[in-house]
Amino acid sequence: MAEIDQELLTVNNLDDIERELGANPFPWTDVCTEEIMQWLDCYSICHRTAKEVLLMVMMTTTSSLLGNSTIRVYDNDPFEEKANLHTIVIGPSGIGKSPAARHGCRLPLTEHLETKVNKIMWTDEPTENGLFNFFVSNDNVVPMLCIDEATEFLRRTVSQKGRKGLLEMSRMCKLYDGDSWFMLKGTKGKRSGVSEARCSFLALCTAKEFLESIWPVAIAAKNGFPDRILLYYKFESHRATLSDVGEKLNKLRQEYGSLQNLNGVFEDIYTRHNSGSSIKYTLSNEAKEIYIKHVDEAIPSQESNTRNSSSCNHKVQRNILKVALNLHVLYNRITNVLDGQSNQIPVRISVHTMNNAIALIEFLKRMRAISELAHTSQSPRSFPSLSNESLGAVVRVRRGVFFYKAFPQEINETTLAKYRISPEEYRQCYFSDDSHITDDQKLYMETHHPRAEEYQLLQNGPAE
């Protein structure tokens, strides 16, 4: 299962987190057919990237090409899930993030599909106003927002400073959900916008900066943005030699002549899903049974502790359906090309594809759980600087490191202002209870307080 026992992980810094992330191999046999995996291996080496990264990029790109197509669990279910995915791929330099974005997304869309359909499909517009204008000008398009080298974009997105004009986490959540987006324009306040603004989102960036300064901020915000993201970490693997590349280029030409690039696959997917009424996909009886069982087993009982139970997250359930739909369509089209066929895409998703989707989501959930250690490890790294500013004291007790906040009456207001905290806010926070620690843990920490007697007086109030 995706949940991890953090007590079993030795994590002292970001290098340890990357090591733990890299220790999880991609579950190819559970996610992909041998035929497609062999082509992916050949195609990715030819373009100096990793097949895992390329698959994540291709799947996310497919999610924009499906337009307003939907998937539902029950045939008569009023709830329908759209296809669009939000994906972030991280890893060290040299794993082929940029080539994957170029050949698995940008080039097939901008240099082929857009000229065929005379519509703009791809954008790397990082501002709210620019993306809003895109929706207004391009009706009935689910744009592919693809940003390579996305560190600065993501850093601005998760910033809580509210700088005008930037895409913030709240807007990204709405673009995942497909909320309406209207603005008042001009002196007369004329309303402009669209009733449903939905996009597919792909960001690729270096892991260290992401885990150090972006992901912890996003998690701490607790606004649902991380829950919507498919986060994949690709560890640095063996790079293909020039001899390997030459061999794969010959193989791609000789054995996969009909699949030299993704132009035809993506054009076919787009044409089939944007030339009339939206296609409504459903689950086969076996796929439905597997999905319902998986979701129901992940929902904890009322008696259990659900505080850290990401398995029952509603966004996980939604992403399983989204991934199943996208893999169903993408794999069907690739297989048809490899086999020299041009069959219709079945509207019922098989149990095999549902198992593929569940396996991939469970794998990504484990990635997400390990990545969250970056959030919990960020606080200890900030202890020394806070202590130097007289905002508290660092105390080591056995294997633990505790930070005891300075008493409210001793805090310098100028120092607090640097962190945009008022004296009253600090006081309220100081005396608030932390629901994440037990009574025994609280007593243990109070016992080792460097100024225990003064702390008790402060907590209990002055003697009458």
Image: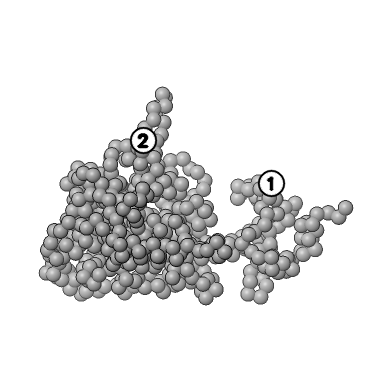
Q: Amino acid at mark 2?
A: Gly
Pinpoint residue 113: horizontal percent, then vertical percent: 20, 49
Q: For this view, does 389 lie left or right of residue 289?
A: right
Residue under the point 35% across and 37% down: 194
Q: Amino acid at mark 1?
A: Glu
- In the image, 244 versus 193, the foreground residue is 193
* Element carrying mark 1: helix
Q: For this view, does 420 lie left or right of residue 48?
A: right
Q: Can you tell which quarter of the image residue 346 is in?
A: bottom left
* Element carrying mark 2: strand
Judge whether 235 appears above or below 159 on screen.
below
Q: Can you tell which quarter of the image residue 166 is in?
A: top left
Res 88 visible: no
Q: Are marks 2 and 1 in contact (CB under 8 Å)?
A: no
Residue under the point 44% across and 63% down: 296
Q: Which residue is mark 1?
A: 424
Q: Which residue is mark 2?
A: 193
Q: For this view, does 139 lie left or right of residue 306?
A: left
- In the image, 278 versus 264, the foreground residue is 278
Pinpoint residue 23: horizontal percent, then vertical percent: 41, 74
Sequence-wise, the earlier of marks 2 and 1 is 2
Which of the two discs, 2 and 1, sits closer to the camera?
Answer: 2
Residue under the point 67% across and 72% down: 397
Residue under the point 35% across and 41% down: 196
Pinpoint residue 341: horizontal percent, then vertical percent: 12, 61
- In the image, 367 versus 409, the foreground residue is 367
Is disc 2 surrounded by few (<14), some (14 to 19) or many (20+) residues within 10 Å? some
CA distance for labels 2 and 1: 41 Å
- In the image, 427 versus 174, the foreground residue is 174
Pinpoint residue 318: horizontal percent, then vertical percent: 39, 56
